[in-house]
Image (spheres, rainbow, N blue to C red):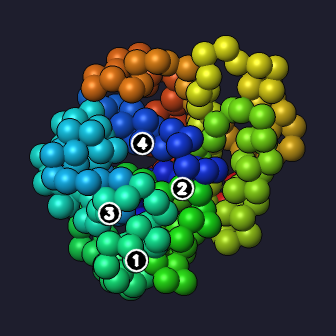
Amino acid sequence: MANGIFITGTDTGVGKTIVAAILAYSFKRQYIDFGYIKPMESGIPDDDYLARRSDAARVKKAGALSESFAEIVPYTFPEPLAPLLAARRSGMEITGDKLINTIRNLIHPQRRTIIEGAGGLLAPLCEDFLVLDLIKELEFPALVVSRTALGSINHTLLTLDRLRREDIPILGVIANHTTQAPDVAEKTFIKQLTEFDPVTIMGELPYNPDLQTDSPDWEQLATHIDIKTLLRQSQTTAAPQ
């Protein structure tokens, strides 16, 4: 199995980038040699936006990464759409094989690599090629990020079920609270989820309005993720939970 973590989500906008940034910050603080790759990012109108406001920029800053943006996010598209549609509308043709080869050329085997997906498992990246296919090709264990809102139990259970059916090792779930005043569904999300699935809960992020700022308190946010267990599991996980 590859030396890394693939951050996937139950949907788009669930907090994958925030989790990637927290991990990058934590790895940097622990002097862990690591890299970060977001293979495709949509909604990037120009280079200035990429350097200042993109998901890649946020993780690069949090982890103090020296790599260029071309090494972190090899494919960008101007419209905020699913990668396959965004690529088509921008006139780019990217095959699954081309995407995989690009990513593999950016991975340094001796380093721990964080890879952040786009949307959920079945989000289309290329023609006949989904996020799920990318995870399988790279052989990275999956860390699942989920919202805690109403409906997320279903989305999370479906995601976990599909990962297991594809024999993809699961590191665990990180639950992300995205509303300021959580209702009963959000407050009981983890309890409900673990009633139906024995998955490891690697963290629970509280609602934090500062997440949209340039410099959230990464140190404080990192206390809500079990980084030590995540690191150990990412090294030793060899079969689905």
Horizontal and vertical percent position of residue 194: 80, 37
Horizontal and vertical percent position of residue 192: 84, 33
User: Dot 2 surroundings within 10 Å: few (below 14), some, or many (20 or more)?
Assistant: many
CA gap, disc 2 to disc 3?
Answer: 15 Å
- Left/right placement of residue 143 relative to residue 111 reads right
- Left/right placement of residue 212 relative to residue 147 reads left
Q: Residue at x 41, y 67 (%)?
A: 86
* Viewer-closest of 120 and 198: 120
Q: Nearer the viewer, mark 4 or mark 3?
A: 3
Q: Classify 220 as above or below 137.
A: above
What is the number of the mark on residue 17?
4
Read off the residue under disc 2: 119
Q: Is residue 32 visible?
A: no
Secondary element at image label 2: strand
- Left/right placement of residue 195 relative to residue 24 reads right
* Viewer-closest of 59 and 11: 11
Read off the residue under disc 3: 77
Q: Earlier in the sequence, mark 4 or mark 2?
A: 4
Horizontal and vertical percent position of residue 193: 80, 38
Secondary element at image label 1: helix
Secondary element at image label 3: strand
User: Dot 4 surroundings within 10 Å: few (below 14), some, or many (20 or more)?
Assistant: many
What is the number of the mark on residue 212?
none
Amino acid tagged 2: Gly
CA gap, disc 4 to disc 1?
Answer: 24 Å
Amino acid tagged 1: Arg
Q: Earlier in the sequence, mark 1 or mark 2?
A: 1
Read off the residue under disc 1: 88
Q: Earlier in the sequence, mark 3 or mark 1?
A: 3
Horizontal and vertical percent position of residue 202: 59, 35
Q: Residue at x 34, y 31 (%)?
A: 26
Q: Nearer the viewer, mark 4 or mark 1?
A: 1
